Every structure is written in C-alpha cells, then in structure tokens.
Amino acid sequence: MAYPTLLETPDYTAAADAKREVSNVKFGDGYVQDIVMGINSVSETFTLTFKRQPAEATALYEWFKANGMRFYWTPPQSVEKLWTLKGDIRQDFDNAGWYRVSVILEQRFDPDVP
C-alpha cells in the first residue's frame, strides 16, 4: 500500500522515546527470564512542534487530519520510517501571528514495507 510522506521539518526540539516490549518471568531466588515480545520489539515515539505562518500551519493541520493513520517521515539522523498519530493534533495561535501545530508520532511496522 502506498502511504503519503510528511516532508515538513519541525521547528522545535523533536523529543524521541524508544520503548521495548519485553515480558519478564520470575522463577524465584532472583532468577528472571526476559522474553522479547514479537519481531519488532522496539518502537519509537516522537513529539513534534511546527511553528508556521497561519496559512502554512492550517495546511499542515489539515494534512495530519487527512493522513494521520499511516505515513512516512524521516526523523533527525535516521532513515524514513512508517508512523501514525498518537493522540490529538494540537493547533495553537500566537498573538504575534504565528501558529503552532503539535503532534505525537508513534512508529508502525508494516509487513509490506521494507
């Protein structure tokens, strides 16, 4: 399936988090076995904020509303990956004439995507 690509670069610090899916089995006497859950056991999330002029911010806000289910984006110092929106799309309005669009992206894995 062809997914759209987010080409915008965030204006503020992009905060990244990586989460490992691991199950622990405790046997007693301090022995613990860690089991990696699934093939893609480490997924990332990014918190992004874009500061734009009103027309550009509104267009970006609408892009996320239309394409937020699955899309490609290249994080800083990384390669293009598949993402989805986690939570809300937030648009803030400044008195100085700038708008801010804030989103949280969560990495997705697709068997059809290399």
Image (cartoon, rainbow, N blue to C red):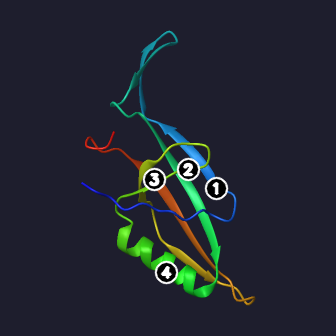
Picture disc at residue 14: 1
Q: Position of residue 75 (x, y in %)?
A: 56, 50
Residue 32: image tag: none
Q: x%, y% of residue 63?
A: 43, 74
Q: Quadrant of residue 93?
A: bottom right
Q: Secondary structure at mark 4?
A: helix
Report the number of discs: 4
Residue under the point 44% across and 79% down: 62
- Give the label, 2 or 3, closer to the camera: 2
Q: Work out how far the residue at label 1 is from the one at label 2, CA to CA, in angstroms.
A: 8 Å
At label 2, the amino acid type is: Pro
Whether residue 12 sits left or right of residue 36 in the image: it is right
Observer-side mark, 4 or 1, equals 4
Q: Nearer the viewer, residue 101 or 17?
A: 101
Q: Which residue was labeled with disc 2? A: 75
The answer to the question of whether label 4 and label 1 lie on touching residues, with beta carbons closer than 8 A, is no
